[in-house]
Amino acid sequence: MKIKRMFLVTIAILVILLTSCSSFCNTKSNDKKGEKMDLSILQGKTWQLIKVKKTGKNIELNRDQMNTIQQENMFTLIFKDKNISGKGFPNNYSGQITNQDNRKLSFPPIVSTRMALLTNTNNLLLQEDEYFQLLQKTTSWDIKDNNLILNTVDNENKEAKLIYNIK
């Protein structure tokens, strides 16, 4: 009887350890290069663009400042099933995800509404057309420090990164 009870307790402990290790290991694997990452971790969240890194030029989007001028929903990205959508400035956009292999990602072409912008955009650090072009040239993705990083290239085929955090 004691052996049976010890066996059951051992099995229960193993199940608990395996379950907790599984959750922990899945979280940690996001930061390890070379390991497969599942696109499902991006699904159903609204990602806000916070920075564009380009050769010789970094663009920081100050979300606190954007919130005060009611532009907090600009330059967003949402993954849903095999599609993306979001808001540029000022247009909505959408597209399909065409390549989802390990860390590879592409979604050309991006389609968008064509609403007129009634605000002077000269002070904007990032123009909507430039954002859409960078998005369409995405080649891969990563998660680092809870930020989504889309690797892309600019118009001169130089490396660029779109960096998002969760809204």
Image: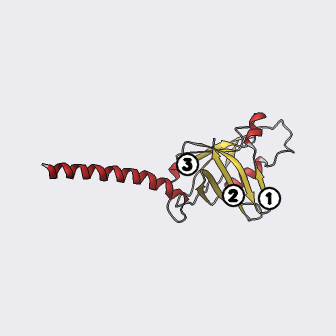
On screen, residue 167 versus residue 100, left or right, reads right
Q: Is residue 142 above or below residue 1?
A: below
Whichever of labels 2 and 3 marks the residue nearer the N terminus, that label is 3
Q: Please state the horizontal and vertical placement of residue 145, each as a whole percent of the image.
A: 60, 53
Q: Residues within 10 Å of mark 1 (few under 14, many from 20)?
A: few
Q: Residues within 10 Å of mark 3 (few under 14, many from 20)?
A: some
Whichever of labels 1 and 3 marks the residue nearer the N terminus, that label is 3
Whichever of labels 1 and 2 marks the residue nearer the N terminus, that label is 1
Q: Quadrant of the C terminus?
A: top right
Q: Quadrant of residue 150?
A: bottom right
Q: Secondary structure at mark 1?
A: strand
Residue flagged by tag 3: what amino acid is it? Leu
Q: Please state the horizontal and vertical placement of residue 60, each as a whole percent of the image.
A: 76, 50
- The mark found on residue 57 in the picture is 1
Extreme residue in the left direction: 1
Q: Secondary structure at mark 3?
A: helix
Residues 162 and 144: in front is 144
Residues 57 and 157: in front is 57
- Which residue is under mark 2? 161
Residue flagged by tag 1: what amino acid is it? Lys
